[in-house]
């Protein structure tokens, strides 16, 4: 019968059989799926797994440090490489305003950075030799869930994939075999397994957050200053929604900075000419459709007062009351 304990035991056995004495790498996104997949593999093969977290500088306030700390502590010190790539991403994004262009650039820089980290790990563990040739295959852990498997047409796991050679310095003769310990699980089961493995609630119950991060929540060019403004506003919104006990009711609440829009305001005895932010709280089951969340007026009022008081550059807070469709959840 299905119990979380059985699933863990079964997967740990399968992972050991699949990887043998091999070397595995897992990219952590900060989300629950990659964290649970990594924790399972770590339980199975210990230090032969190295996790990689690429900090692209587009995360929310203190988020990268929290992920590092929470994941490290709860797995009893899984090997984790954190790559600080903020400058690289911001340089690549300079001057770019088109949403799909932003996504493309962030995706490309991500692969490049991740592959460089993989190459370093595989050299250190002898999978890549001194001449830069592959001595063995490597294993790549992914948090693919059952619904993703069904959507992409099923098939058995353990596919082999080639590296994107010449992007991030991986040798052409290297191949990866996928390890997907969550292939038979739904999201609620993944959360149960994560909880059982000792991962903290902030990981297990983390709301969805897009891979491109705050890069697609700044309408206009992404700069360090704008990111800092948005991070401050977003932190306040999250704090107040959490304090009001709304985290599980709300699917997610993007805060969007309209960086190219200014409006006139008044504060103290001075005129201001600042930027608006948009609060986008939604309810949803699967993000395919969504409704705007009926957040109590008092909570909205507190968020608005605090953001305009505490974030100098923002003088107006607005609420998005569009469902999906026709609106998407994100603004870009
Ligand atoms: P939309 O805006 O399309 O978002 O209604 C649906 C869900 O997907 C997330 N999202 C993304 N996730 N990369 C991601 O990993 C992306 O480029 C991306 N765009 C949107 C969004 O946060 C929501 O949960």
Image (tube, helix red, strand yellow):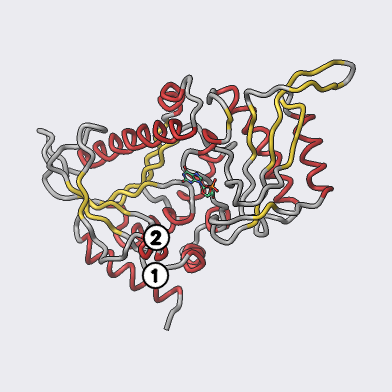
Residue 137's spot in the image, x, y percent?
16, 50
Q: Position of residue 2 (x, y in %)?
A: 43, 79
The tag on residue 8 is: 1
Residue at 38%, 58% in the rendered image: 144
Q: How many marks?
A: 2
* Residue shown at the point (12%, 38%) measured from the top left: 129
Distance (Cα) linking label 2 and label 1: 20 Å
- Looking at the image, which residue sits at the far right? 269
Residue visible at 44% across and 54% down in the picture: 35
- Res 227 quadrant in image: top right
Question: Does the residue tagged 1 have its C-beta within 8 Å of any atom of ligand 1?
Answer: no
Residue 55 in percent (x, y) is at: 45, 35
Instruction: In the displayed orientation, state which residue is furthest to the top.
Output: 270
Indicate the quadrant containing the C terminus: top left, top right, bottom left or bottom right. Answer: top right
Dividing the image into 4 quarters, which one contains the N terminus?
bottom left
Question: Looking at the rendered structure, which numbered label has been put on residue 148?
Answer: 2
Question: Along the horizontal axis of the image, is 303 left or right of 270?
Answer: left
**Ligand 1 neighbours mark 2 (CB distance < 8 Å):** no
Q: Nearer the viewer, residue 72 or 118?
A: 118
């Amino acid at each position: 019968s299905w119990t979380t304990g059985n699933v863990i035991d079964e997967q740990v056995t399968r992972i050991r059989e699949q990887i043998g004495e091999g070397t595995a790498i897992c990219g952590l996104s900060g989300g629950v799926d990659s964290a649970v997949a990594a924790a399972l593999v770590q339980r199975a093969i210990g230090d032969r797994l190295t996790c990689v977290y690429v900090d692209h500088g587009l995360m929310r306030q203190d988020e990268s440090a929290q992920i590092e700390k929470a994941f490290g502590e709860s797995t009893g010190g899984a090997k984790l490489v954190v790559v600080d790539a903020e400058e690289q991403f911001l340089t690549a994004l300079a001057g770019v305003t088109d949403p799909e262009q932003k996504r493309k650039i962030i995706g490309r820089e991500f692969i490049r950075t991740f592959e460089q980290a993989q190459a370093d790990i595989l050299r250190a563990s002898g999978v890549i030799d001194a001449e830069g040739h592959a001595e063995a295959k490597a294993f790549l852990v992914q948090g693919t869930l059952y619904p993703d498997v069904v959507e992409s047409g099923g098939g058995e796991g353990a596919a082999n994939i080639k590296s994107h050679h010449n992007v991030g310095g991986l040798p052409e003769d290297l191949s990866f075999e996928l390890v997907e310990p969550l292939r038979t699980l739904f999201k609620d089961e993944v959360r149960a397994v994560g909880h059982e493995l000792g991962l903290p609630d902030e990981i297990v119950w983390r709301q969805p957050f897009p891979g491109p991060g705050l890069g697609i929540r700044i309408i206009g060019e992404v700069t360090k200053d704008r990111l800092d403004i948005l991070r401050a506003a977003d932190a306040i919104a999250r704090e107040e929604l959490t304090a009001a006990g709304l985290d599980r009711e709300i699917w997610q609440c993007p805060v969007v900075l309209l960086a190219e829009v200014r409006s006139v305001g008044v504060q103290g005895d001075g005129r201001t000419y600042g930027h608006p932010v948009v609060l986008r709280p939604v309810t949803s089951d699967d993000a395919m459709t969504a409704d705007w969340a009926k957040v109590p007026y008092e909570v909205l009022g507190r968020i608005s007062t605090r953001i305009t008081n505490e974030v100098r550059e923002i003088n107006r807070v607005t609420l998005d009351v569009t469902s999906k469709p026709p609106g998407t959840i994100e603004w870009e």
